[in-house]
Structure formats: C-alpha cells, structure tokens
Amino acid sequence: MRRFLRGVLVPLGILLTWQALASLGVFNAIILPSPLAVAARWLAYLRPLEAFDPAAMSRIAWLVSGELPRDACGSLYRVLVGFALGTGLALPLGLAMGYSRLANTLFDPLVQVLRPIPPIAYIPLAILWFGLGNPPAFFLISLGAFFPVLVNTIAGVQHVDGIYLRVARNLGAGRATTFRRVILPAAAPYIMAGARIGMGTAFIVVIVAEMIAVNNGLGYRILEAREYMWSDKIIAGMFTIGLLGLGIDTLMNRLSRWLLRWHRGLEQ
C-alpha cells in the first residue's frame, strides 16, 4: 500500500494542479478541458442522456453505444497481432545472428540500415502494398516491435558469460544442448526486456496506423475528435491507450518475473 501511494502521488498532484488551473480559467475549456470534464465524458453511461445538451450527444454516444470498448478492443487486437508477427520474426533471426558469426556478417549491415527508419516512414508503402484496413496496420506494428526484440536478442546471446559455455563443454554438452540449455536461458532477460520495449513501440505505432489506414480504433477516434475539436474525447482516448499499455506492461512484467525467477535466485 505504501508503494502504491508513492506511485500515485505525482499523477495525483498533476491532476489536482490541472483541475485547479482549469477552474481558474487559465485554460480554454475547448482546448484543454478539466480532468472532471474528461471523466464526465468517460463515465457518461452512468447518467441519463437527457441530462446532456444535444451538441454533446455524439461524444457521449462513444461510451453509451459501446464504441469505446470496441475501439479499445480493435486497437489491442492490432497491437497483439502485430507484436506477435514482429517478435516471431525477430527471435529466430536474433538468436541466429547472436550465435553465428556468419549470420551476423550477412544480416547485420541490412539491419543497421533499416533499423533507424521509423515505422511511420513506411506508411505510403504499406498502403500501396496492402491497401487499407488491418493488413497495413499489422505490417507497421510488426516493424515497430521487430527491431527492439531483434537487437536485445542479439545482445543477450552475445553477452552470455563464457564460464557457462566452458562448463557446458567440459560436461560434454553438444552445440544443440548448449544452445538450448545454456545460451537461450542466459539470454532470456535481454529478450524479455526487448519484448517490453517492442510492446511499447507497438502501442505508439498502432495509433498512427489507425489514423491513416483503418476506420475504427482509438487512433481513428482521436483523429475524428480532432476534426470536431472534441478535446475531452481526445484526452479520454489518450488515457484509454495509457491504461491499455499499463495493463499489458504489467502482465509482461509479471510474466518476465515468473519466467526469470531462477535468474533472481542466481543474483541472490
């Protein structure tokens, strides 16, 4: 509980300051509504529709009609599929490049050329290659997740302590056994760290992809709200993205701690 209270202290202070400044009229309510106004839109289903003015009905309908849950599920679906595709390609390539000098020599120049290019730069090509809808979004998200997982996997394999390899050889382990029982577990902390970074990048890319290539999702709704200057809806969508990202990262952190419980035992 003490740790939780320390964690919410700064966000709570920011919200209180934001609310105080909004109440004093420092911010234009159209440009930056107060936290209470955003929360009212977010939780509008708790109040009868007749209590709101007709101009706000379209924003309230985002929650009442179930649009917000559908958009959140759509964004989460794209993130998970794109992340799975990117990770599924990055893991075997990263393991091969980290373990084999030949593979590293062949693929490293191409990786170093493509890695600095942001996934957003691929948007025109993604639309030309895949059209509109989910396929270009999957492609862009997989690119965003690919390189963090790849680079961390390579680093994890290359930084395996040499004493583990020597012990395995002295005990008569072959290359396949050494790779499976020594190198892969030793590289797991790096791989899990890369996966968490890749998931964060996937959440960034999905919003941009939804603003361009699809007609639903949180990114699409945020862009739609911008056209009508619905700042409360924009911020509600942003907070929804943040909560989804926090939930996924928490699950990944717990999974990582469970998978690497043996590693913590070695550190102790």
Image (cartoon, grey):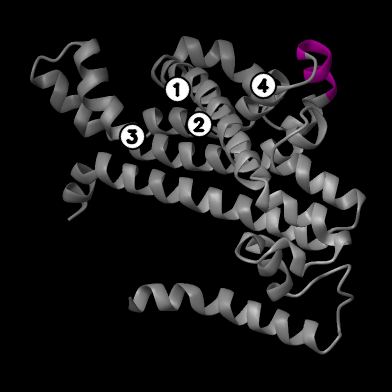
Cα distance in 3D space between marks 1 and 4 = 17 Å
Q: In which quarter of the image is the C terminus?
A: bottom left
Residue at 78% across, 86% down: 23
Q: Which of 229 and 54 is in front in this view?
A: 54
**Mark 4 or 2 closer to N-term?**
4
Q: Is residue 40 left or right of residue 163?
A: right
Specify the amino acid type for callout 4. Answer: Phe
Specify the amino acid type for callout 3. Answer: Ala
Stretch of the chain drawn in magenta: 124-130
Residue 242 drawn at (x, y percent):
60, 54
Residue at 47% across, 18% down: 97
Q: Is residue 146 visible?
A: yes
Specify the amino acid type for callout 2. Answer: Val
Cα distance in 3D space between marks 3 and 1 = 11 Å
**Mark 3 or 2 closer to N-term?**
2
Q: Name the residue under label 3.
A: 188
- Numbered mark located on residue 91 in the image: 1
Secondary-structure class at tag 1 = helix
**Mark 1 or 4 closer to N-term?**
1
Mark closer to the observer (4, 3): 4
